[in-house]
Image: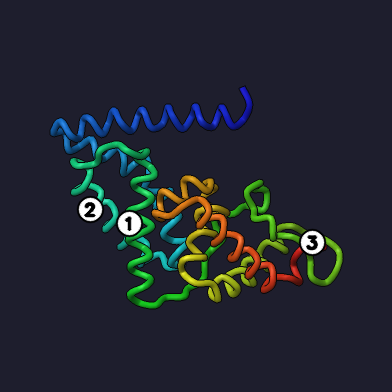
């Protein structure tokens, strides 16, 4: 079994567990909702924070997300995975919040470790020449990346968050944002090209 098969199997197992708790909730066990709060609150906090850059706003929005999910879960038909459904609620709630305030806040990369294999591919070189200490470069890049991301539209920033930080594939992002995979690829390509231009001094040649 290769890595993709293993990830798919893990995802299927996780969704089967979600569906069991969903059934309990629909049968009237409202405490079953606590399972979803415990399982997803950290991940949802991360995505919201990476979109807003503000912990107080994130805490308020996360509470709104779970209130909306609690009210809607009884009518959830299971036509998508539960985590996809929750991410969609979180993403749409946050987008609405940002659009209303016309916010253009910095995206934080605090959740990246210098040893994390998921560090974006544009984390690259010391603009002064040789590759330096990864911890130092990461800190410097975070500041520059935050500045660059503020220049992207909310829509393109969201795609970057979901793909680069949350590690979602094009199909998952499309389901969350309600658009085609082609649209996701187009937005992601545009966002990356813009970031590459803005961060050209930090890119590998």
Q: Identify the residue shown where x is 69% and y is 60%.
A: 122
* Nearest to N terminus: mark 3 or mark 1: 1
How far separated are the C-alphas under marks 1 and 2?
9 Å
Q: Circle 2 — which element?
A: helix
Give coordinates of residue 184: x percent, y percent.
51, 56
Give coordinates of residue 101: x percent, y percent.
35, 77
Most foreground residue, 17 or 140: 17
**152, above or below 11, in the image:** below
The label number, if any, that marks residue 62 in the structure image: 1
The label number, if any, that marks residue 204 in the structure image: 3
The label number, if any, that marks residue 67 in the structure image: 2
How far separated are the C-alphas under marks 3 and 1?
37 Å
Q: Identify the residue shown where x is 18% and y is 41%.
A: 74
Q: Identify the residue shown where x is 33% and y is 67%.
A: 96
Q: Circle 1 — which element?
A: helix
Q: Identify the residue shown where x is 20% and y is 37%.
A: 31
Q: Quadrant of the N terminus?
A: top right
Q: Is residue 193 left or right of residue 158?
A: right
| Occupied quadrant, residue 83 | top left
Q: Is residue 127 left or right of residue 112?
A: right
């Amino acid at each position: 079994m290769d890595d993709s098969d293993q990830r798919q199997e893990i995802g299927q197992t996780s969704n089967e567990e979600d569906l069991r708790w969903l059934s309990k909730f629909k049968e009237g066990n409202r405490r079953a909702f606590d399972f979803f709060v415990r399982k997803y609150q950290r991940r949802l906090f991360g995505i919201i924070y990476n979109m807003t850059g503000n912990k107080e706003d994130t805490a308020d929005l996360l509470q709104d997300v779970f209130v909306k999910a609690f009210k809607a879960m009884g009518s959830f038909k299971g036509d998508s995975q539960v985590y996809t459904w929750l991410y969609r609620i979180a993403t749409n709630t946050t987008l609405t919040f940002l659009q209303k305030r016309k916010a253009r806040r910095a995206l934080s990369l605090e959740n990246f470790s210098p040893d994390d294999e998921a560090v974006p591919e544009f984390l690259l070189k010391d603009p002064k020449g040789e590759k330096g200490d990864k911890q130092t470069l990461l800190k410097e890049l975070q500041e520059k990346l935050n500045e660059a991301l503020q220049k992207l539209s909310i829509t393109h920033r969201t795609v970057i968050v979901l793909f680069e930080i949350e590690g979602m594939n094009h199909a998952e992002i499309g389901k969350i944002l309600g658009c085609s995979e082609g649209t996701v690829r187009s937005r992601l390509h545009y966002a990356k090209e813009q970031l590459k231009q803005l961060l050209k001094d930090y890119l590998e040649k």
